[in-house]
Amino acid sequence: MFVWSTISDYISTGAAESSALRMGKTISPEGIAAITKAIDDSCVDGVMGLPGVTVMVVNKQGEELLAHIAGRREGAESEEHLALDAVYYMVSRTKMVTGLACMQLVERGKLSLDDVEAVERLCPELKEVKVLQDDGTFVPKKRDHSSHASLSYRLTRYIAGFGYSSLNKKLAGFKENICNIEQFMQPLVNQPGEKWEYGISIDWAGILVERATKMRLGTYFQENIFDPLGIKHTSFSLSGEMKSKLVTMHKRHPDGSLSPADAHPRQAVVNAETEEEQESLFQSGGAGLFGTIRDYSRILAALLNGGTSPTTNYPPTR
């Protein structure tokens, strides 16, 4: 388990500690002890507990206020303990990086927050997408300007009308194979602008970045976000070294117990033996990255620091 936000629940129990963290200071010894105990306790039960947890807290100076691990890399029955350089499938943590890329392009004048025509010119598939009804029929999406899929008010705010097949029964016949772009050619489940729904719209924002820059999304991330921030172990692909450190994903059963998952959501990436194979796969802006907690913390530190990396002095949103 890769923890970013839930740790704040423990930090914010003391107003002074919470204020200190926001000001870029530190956490009290008592706070650190409480957090590490909670982490360790969560991994004690090998069946009902968590197989492993990695937690890091940074401030806006980029200082690691807390770095703690518990559990094992491949599950409770494995011999190998987790390490801070463990590689996680980052799933939806990818979305924030895609958001940074979008805002960079807005600042550089290559994308506009509200230019509907530009979005549909770069992604013509969105122009004629239809809305799937509860009875299985399709209706045209509304064409008034307020309902169009603009970058700011639709794609990045989950009101473009897209859903996830795992969360919306209407999409039961669809599957987001996140190694294949064809699987993202889904209908809408709501009229654009009418309802918030978690879905694949950020993936379309990633496609928009690729088409606006004529670069693979991973290449854009590397050159414009990762390299400037000193991030070296985060990617849409897996090197041999990263594979050897990849944390096993688990599934929860109805009784609450956990066991290793039968297959990885990005199994094609895990199985790919060459760089060419990995590069041929769709790079999902919504859930495609692999990386380490220390790398991700570098992004968070830059955001806490007003958009400038405290270690490289590089502004990742410009």
Image: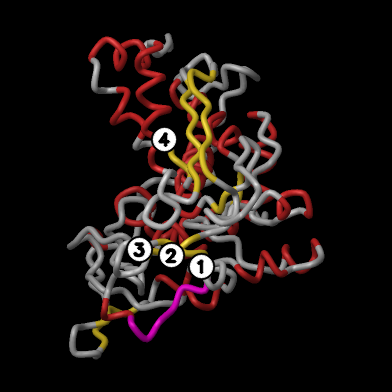
> Per the image, is 175 magenta?
yes
Q: What residue would you read off at disc 3?
A: 199
The secondary element bearing badge 2 is classed as: strand
**Spatial CA span between label 2 and label 3:** 21 Å
Tell me which numbered mark, 2 or 1, is placed earlier along the sequence: 2
Image coordinates of residue 33 in percent, x first then y, are: 40, 20
At label 2, the amino acid type is Lys
Task: State whether the magenta stretch is mostly helix, strand or loop.
Answer: loop
Amino acid bearing label 1? Ala
| Residues at discs 1 and 3 in contact (Cβ within 8 Å) | no
Residue occupying image coordinates x 80% and y 65%:
276
- Identify the mark nearer the N-term, 2 or 4: 4
Q: Nearer the viewer, residue 263 or 192?
A: 263
Place of residue 177 in the rendered image (x, y in percent of width and height, measured from the top left) = 52, 74
Q: Which residues are magenta?
A: 172-177
- List the residue tagged with mark 4: 39
Quadrant position of residue 155:
bottom left
Could you tell me which residue is drawn at 35 percent across and 10 percent down? 20
| Residue at the spot of label 2 | 251
Task: Give the secondary structure at mark 1.
Answer: loop
> Distance of mark 2 from mark 1, alpha carbons?
5 Å
